[in-house]
Image (cartoon, helix red, strand yellow):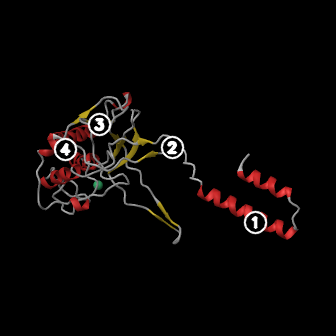
Amino acid sequence: MSRVEILIAAMSLFKLHPSQKRWLWRLLFGAIALLIALTPFTPAPAQPSFPTPQAHPLPDFIQRLPQLEADYFAEIQTTPLGYLMWSHFPVTIYVQQPTAAEVEDKKFEKWLKSVDVAIADWQEYFPLVEISEPDNADITVLRQRPQRDIQVDRDNQRLIIPDARHGTARYEFYLTPTEPPLIQHRFTISLSPAQNAKHMRGTARHELGHALGLWGHSLDEDDVMYGLQVRRPPPISGRDLSVLRRVYEQPTQVGWAVVENSAS
Ligand SMILES: [Zn+2]
């Protein structure tokens, strides 16, 4: 028998005046409310908790990159989970292959060659390996015009339409099926075939730079990560590499394990 039940039973023993009863009921409800307030709340169902942001061990190839005083690290953006960087190497990349009908397509061949050269440009500094199957690739390069995302400006009754671009890079997060699960990301690059070889290569190099960790734009047109298209796409600069090095020195939640809180 609970304390409340005892109290109710005790009340029924006495014949009380209605006003006294009302007073007693008020006291009873007050006591119950107080009891509820003081009872430790029941925990919500188990939710995985975020890893503490920390830096990954600096790989050798990153340590070999230059450290420059003046670079554009300040332009690099973080994600809701911190800086984007890889923590397993080599990073795998899948490049869209021609279908049987496209094998003879010279334009497709030209596109493939431009992407391959851009990959080779980065391979000088970064362990990137091309794989022949799209499954589980860290980076996927698709031969398509980038999708133009539009935003609706409801207040002014208009659509915000960005300029058409030749390349875009997008990332998404996922949990690895390991124990414990790790927060990982994968990149999808859309690369338009409607450019000359020189510019396709330049755009591929730029979008790959985003995918490797340069999530921002340089303000200097001599850097691969300059935000606008230039007449002569520049090679990977010391500043690009210096920024990449600084990104990998940062703490992040990407690549670390989530902690599954046990329900108690
Ligand atoms: Zn960009």
Q: CA distance from mark 4 to mark 1?
A: 66 Å
Residue 236, position as x, y percentages in the image: 16, 50
Mark 3 residue crowding within 10 angstroms, few (<14) / some (14–19) / many (20+): many
Q: CA distance from mark 1 to mark 2?
A: 37 Å
Label of residue 58 in the image: 4
Mark 2 residue crowding within 10 angstroms, few (<14) / some (14–19) / many (20+): few
Q: CA distance from mark 2 to mark 3?
A: 35 Å
Q: Which residue carries the number 2 mark?
A: 46
Q: Amino acid at mark 3?
A: Ile
Q: Amino acid at mark 2?
A: Ala
Mark 4 residue crowding within 10 angstroms, few (<14) / some (14–19) / many (20+): few
Q: Nearer the viewer, residue 170 or 141?
A: 170
Q: Nearer the viewer, mark 1 or mark 2?
A: 1
Q: Which quarter is ligand 1 in?
A: bottom left
Q: Nearer the viewer, residue 214 or 95?
A: 214
Q: Which residue carries the number 3 mark?
A: 93
Q: Nearer the viewer, mark 1 or mark 3?
A: 1
Residue 68, position as x, y percentages in the image: 11, 57
Q: Which label's residue is closer to the chain start, 3 or 4?
A: 4
Residue 175, position as x, y percentages in the image: 41, 39
Q: Nearer the viewer, mark 4 or mark 1?
A: 1
Q: Which label's residue is closer to the chain start, 2 or 3?
A: 2
Q: Which label's residue is closer to the chain start, 1 or 2?
A: 1
Q: CA distance from mark 1 to mark 3?
A: 70 Å
Q: Is residue 31 above or below residue 257?
A: below
Label of residue 26 in the image: 1
Q: Amino acid at mark 4?
A: Leu
